Image (cartoon, rainbow, N blue to C red):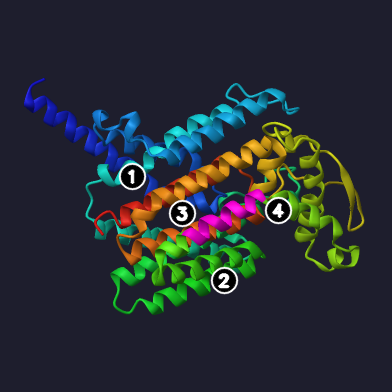
Amino acid sequence: MPISEQSLIGKMRAGLIAAAFLFVLIMFAPISHAGGLGFAPLAVIAGIAGYLGVNGNTIRFQNIPIVFWALFGLVIWAIMTSSWSPYEDKQTLTNPVKLLLGAGLYSGVLLLPKSIKFDQKIIRRAIMAIGWITIGLLLFDNLTNYSLTYFIDPKNAGENPIHHRNTIYMNLSHSITVVAILTPLMITLFKEEFQNWKLPSMIWVLCVLAVSILGKIFVGGVALFAGLMFSYFALKNAKYALFFAISLAIFTILTAPIFGHLMNYVSPELKASLPASWEHRVEMWGYVSEKVAEKPLFGHGFDAARTFGETFNFRGHEGWTKVSLHPHNVGLHLWSETGAIGASLASLFLFGLGQALRPYVAVSSARGSAVIGFLAAALMVCTFTYGIWQEWWWGVLFLLSAFIALSFSKN
């Protein structure tokens, strides 16, 4: 191929990568505010851009870190369990297949530091900007009784107004968890870019606390606190902070059935004193631990939690389903659907992740603070809220991982 033609193709490729990255940055805040479901396709776009930017000869099997083999081992096992799952997935592209394809495509985002040619300072400022836009939208909507969302997405004719409002609440709760796990990176960037970094950091933390309180999202505050605590710990000793964060994550997964079983001993009086969502969690975790005991080794199969139909009397409402789509705890979700094998593979992945990150966080205190704080905040969210197979959650975790990698590609 002539040199001029190679140069033209290289410029076109660089242009496509830059356009894709800019699209991801522009769409991040509105997608987050809309509930985050668009994060999966956004991560696919960013992942493809990452793959486009590297020489195919550099991607060899022997160069792929063990952590990715562990991840795909977990995904493949999860797909295998779908063969005995009672859940019937009638989609042409089933959830297990989407998970496998997604994992492969999302992983490309980690190649973006080799693909993006923008100055690192510009990238940092852009990430900080989308962070402020995301938190600003949340504050505005929560302070104005969801006026922005009602304006963009008004209630349809005949739609139940309570159902519509609950959908908005759920969407904004997703966005609150996004800004919570974004906090360690934001504060690290403030410290790296501004001499008077404490002021924007305090404002950011107060804003995240405010939206968590206004939105009644307890896990937002928990994730915020965990992220800040581990970020600070990482500044003192990144090696031990990473070890503790990974160990805690593995511990929560392996002991999830014990944790769930203990929920069966919570007194009715104590459960009644909890907020409704937490009483439901206590009831759900206790019930799911019993389902784990039924098939502890192989689990009930991928998406089987959707078929757990037992109901209970919930604050005067008869026939309330104990499990809402998933157990709202990653450990119990893994154990109930993929059994001890799935939980072990997930733990192996986390161990591999810790090994892969050790040399990365050792390069600078800023890297360690951002990465380990992010891991700790995400762990809290996974422990108390989301399911393990949610595509949008995978998407946002990969995207924020890419943002961290891009922010510290040169230091």
Q: Secondary structure at mark 3?
A: helix
Give the amino acid at mark 1.
Answer: Phe
- Per the image, is 248 magenta? yes
Residue at point 63%, 24% (across, down) = 91
Closer to the chain start, of discs 1 and 2, is: 1
Q: Which mark is residue 209?
A: 2
Residue placed most toward the observer, 185 or 176: 185
Magenta stretch: give its range: 243-254
Real-space Cα separation, disc 2 to disc 3, in angstroms: 18 Å
Earlier in the chain: of badge 2 and badge 4, it is 4
Q: Residues within 10 Å of mark 4 (few under 14, many from 20)?
A: few
- Residue 169's spot in the image, x, y percent? 66, 56
Q: Is residue 116 left or right of residue 371?
A: left
Tags 1 and 2 in contact by the CB under 8 Å rule?
Answer: no
For mark 3, what is the residue? 29
Are dots 2 and 3 in contact, CB under 8 Å? Answer: no
Cα–Cα gap, marks 2 and 4: 21 Å
Count of numbered circles on the image: 4
Name the residue nearer the viewer: 102 or 249: 249
Q: Earlier in the sequence, mark 2 or mark 3?
A: 3
Q: Which numbered disc covers residue 21?
A: 1
Q: Residues within 10 Å of mark 2 (few under 14, many from 20)?
A: many
Look at the magenta stretch and give its main secondary structure.
helix
